[in-house]
Image (cartoon, rainbow, N blue to C red):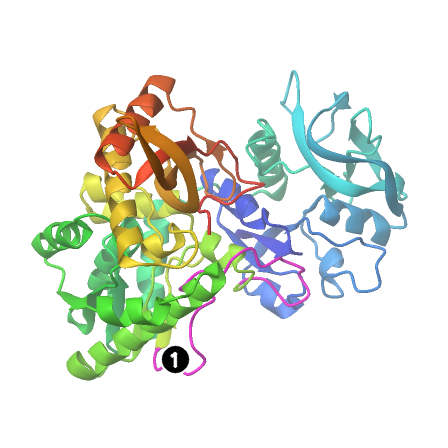
Amino acid sequence: MSVVILDFGSQFTRLIARRFRELGAYSVILPGTATLERIAQENPQGIVLSGGPSSVYDEAAPRPSAGVLDLPVPILGVCYGMQFLAQQAGGTVARAGRREYGKADLTRYGGQLFEGIAGEFVAWMSHSDSVTALPAGYEVVAETLDTPVTAIENSVTRRYGVQFHPEVVHTPKGGQLLANFLGICGITRDWNAEHIVEDLIDGVRAQVGDGRVLLAISGGVDSSTLGLLLARAVGEKLTAVFIDHGLLRLGEREQVEAALLPLGVNLITVDARAEFMGALTGVSDPEQKRKIIGREFIRAFEREARIHGPFDYLAQGTLYPDVIESAGGLHSEKSGAANIKSHHNVGGLPDDLAFKLVEPFRTLFKDEVREIARLLGLPEHIRMRHPFPGPGLAIRVIGAITEEKLDILRRVDDIFISGLREFGLYDGCSQALAVLTPIQSVGVMGDERTYSYTAALRAVTTDDFMTAEWARLPYEFLATMSNRIVNHVHEINRVVYDITGKPPATIEWE
């Protein structure tokens, strides 16, 4: 049994599936235009129509396949999904008199979706359209001051809609609402990490068969966990290759080898620094950087494949946030999902790729991978390591990359990350990083004028990496870091701290 989520382009669709999994219910995302036959393959006990950027009255607005709304299972519409349910049942949707974006208080709520919920209900809104005329058979079960029709339900047909997003953390009681929907669907809540591991191993074995697998490994939690999973799934048919592209942090190559070799991983280290740096010379556009790095990664693996192969598959630790930010994978062409930035393992792959891809984590979040890592026995210091992007320091040096700038950034980054560990702040951050900006400014050190670079520090807290808050690091710590960086990295004379959330910013600067 499952909940099928039909995706109409919302950047938060995957969060709905994640919330259901946290509640112990298996969920899967399909394109909003998935056929009835494809939906039936998932044996759905409930269906969710996601939000999206379109207006339901637009001629080109995405719509589910004919017959979906007639399926004999409960259906929940979220934002755009609610508006579509109302319109198709004979209601009216129009441009709202006042757009709601951000937190709003429900002035009243009730009905089956809100059963057992009491007290203040804060909802996160993001809409320009509203239901202005209710369809027959529906009743309004929640409202705000600015949106009289905030939630609707038809208890006879078991059709429900909410104008807000219950899946985001900004709707604190949204999880209770989604749990109520699972109860309406009659779904057994027994999905857990053990199920995920079993399914992933079975899926890899079914895909790979007798083929040999080449794994792109970095030493981070994603690729390390993938290495353990693939080793369990295909055994000796796996070869793990670590590419040193010259964009790693201080001492990282040695740390990767020291961490993985004792675990029995068949690890081959390749020094490709000259090739990567040559291809990146003079390139300042971040998208171009990512695509070049993706291309060079593949070329390096192709060379290793010729030496150690033949290989049939290339494995990657691609996660769902990578996919959704690149507007790829699960979204249909009509979903309207925006391409925020290309990831090296999603948007940068060449058309003439010589391998078939194996991406078992493509539908998982970071925290789900960490739980899988725990089950597979990955050491804690690797399992809880902060994410580090595949393009490495290339996207943390703003503008064109040089060996000198990389050296400066490595030293700044090492001071910052070491400081977080020293002060006991590392585990309280979800991700922390340093950025070398192209900004140079006047300073004074030892009565002498300086004209040096500005370094930016960034740390965030998040549950899912789809949204994030900037970490409220103590002023004393930030002052200490600034002092250490300026005193030990003489090319830096100014340090700033990034206090922007996601959205509107992304976690990385490029």
Q: Which residues are magenta?
A: 330-355
Front residue (pair 118, 53) = 53
Position of 193 with respect to 33 (left or right) is left
| Residue 454 appears anywhere in the view | yes
Q: Is residue 412 above or below residue 340?
A: above
Q: Secondary structure at mark 1?
A: loop
Residue 19, given in percent of the width and then of the height, sits at 51, 40
Residue beneath label 1, please? 353
Q: Indicate whether residue 340 is drawn in magenta.
A: yes
Residue found 90% across the figure and 43% down from its top = 136
Front residue (pair 136, 240) = 240
Residue found 59% across the figure and 49% down from its top = 13
Q: Quadrant of residue 404?
A: bottom left
| Residue 457 appears anywhere in the view | no
Q: Amino acid at mark 1?
A: Leu
Q: Indicate whether residue 238 is drawn in magenta.
A: no
Residue 251, given in percent of the width and then of the height, sits at 16, 49
Q: Residue furthest front?
A: 448
Position of 368 with respect to 385 (left or right) is right
Q: Give the crowd class for mark 1: few <14, some 14-19, many >=20 residues within 10 Å.
A: few
Residue found 56% across the figure and 59% down from its top = 43
Position of 180 with respect to 84 (left or right) is left
Residue found 62% across the figure and 66% down from its top = 332
Residue 274, given in percent of the width and then of the height, sits at 23, 70
